[in-house]
Image (spheres, grey):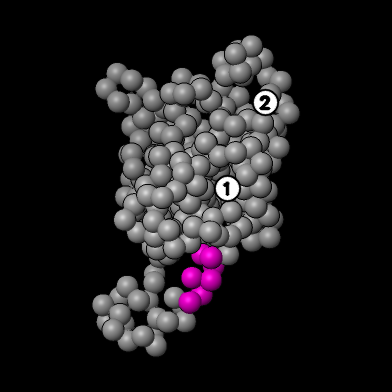
Amino acid sequence: MADPILEVKDVAKYFGGVKALDGVTLSVPRGGMIGLIGPNGSGKTTLFNVITGFYVPTRGEVWFEGERIDGLNPNEVYLKGIVRTFQIPRLFPSLTVLENVLLTPPNQIGERPLYAPIRSKWEKQERELARKAVRLLKRFGLGDYIHASVSELSAAHIKLLETIRGLMTDAKLYLLDEPAAGVAYDMAKEMFSFVRRLRDEEGLTFFIIEHRLEVLMEFVDYVYVLHNGKLLAEGKPDEVVQNKAVIEAYLGG
């Protein structure tokens, strides 16, 4: 692929005798919207964990914007410009929906001890972030829950909130782990439409794990398929869904 923002080179991750990843090589182009599919246990989330520093690979390399990043801790990877969401959302249940969203953006002036007591130093940034958060919450159908506690949300709304938190950053690459899981079909399509608009209008890049193939295949440019820790197939969505090996391994044909 031309102008890759992310390159995974021969990455393996072993847990004792279990080969969760076994020599995966792939790339994500800048400005792309790329899908990652495969059966449960195929290594998808493990790959995301390696890319974002939660796991150190047993073998192989991860490159982001021409810089090798495998071995960095998650905070360092985040500061490089990679944000990921989680299959199981990691939120603060005692805080409101808006407060959870506002915790995400890095480099907030009001969090610096020197400036925190001086309202004039951080007020403008705080207002801009709040406006952005409210726009995203309304766009994803959570406008009525802005001041509600996270504990009051349904499982589907919590999943949406996890995606919104990721979009509050100024990252260059977003790794979304099953953003449509548990979300109604119409809302899932609307969410993917919004993500694609962000890609088109803001030049962002998305790498997306998703089991909802009826939604994913409509929006992504290219798809990678993992099976038993290895790259089974890759190609455009219509090519992948017609691939016999994919049908046998993943679609149950």
Q: Amino acid at mark 2?
A: Val
Furthest residue toward right: 238
Q: Nearer the viewer, residue 178 or 173?
A: 178
Residue 78 percent coordinates (x, y) = 41, 55
Q: Nearer the viewer, residue 77 or 93?
A: 93
| Image-quadrant location for residue 246 | top right
Which residue is located at x 51 percent, y 22 percent? 39
**Taking 104 as reference, is 183 left or right?**
right
Circle 1 SS class:
strand
Tell me how far mark 2 sits from mark 1, CA to CA. Answer: 19 Å
Q: Residues within 10 Å of mark 2 (few under 14, many from 20)?
A: some
Give the magenta part as a residue range. 127-134
Which residue is located at x 55 percent, y 34 percent? 210
- Residue under label 2, please give it: 240
Q: Nearer the viewer, residue 226 or 209?
A: 209
Which residue is located at x 49 percent, y 57 percent? 145
Circles 2 and 1, Cβ within 8 Å, touching? The answer is no
- Residue under label 1, please give it: 206
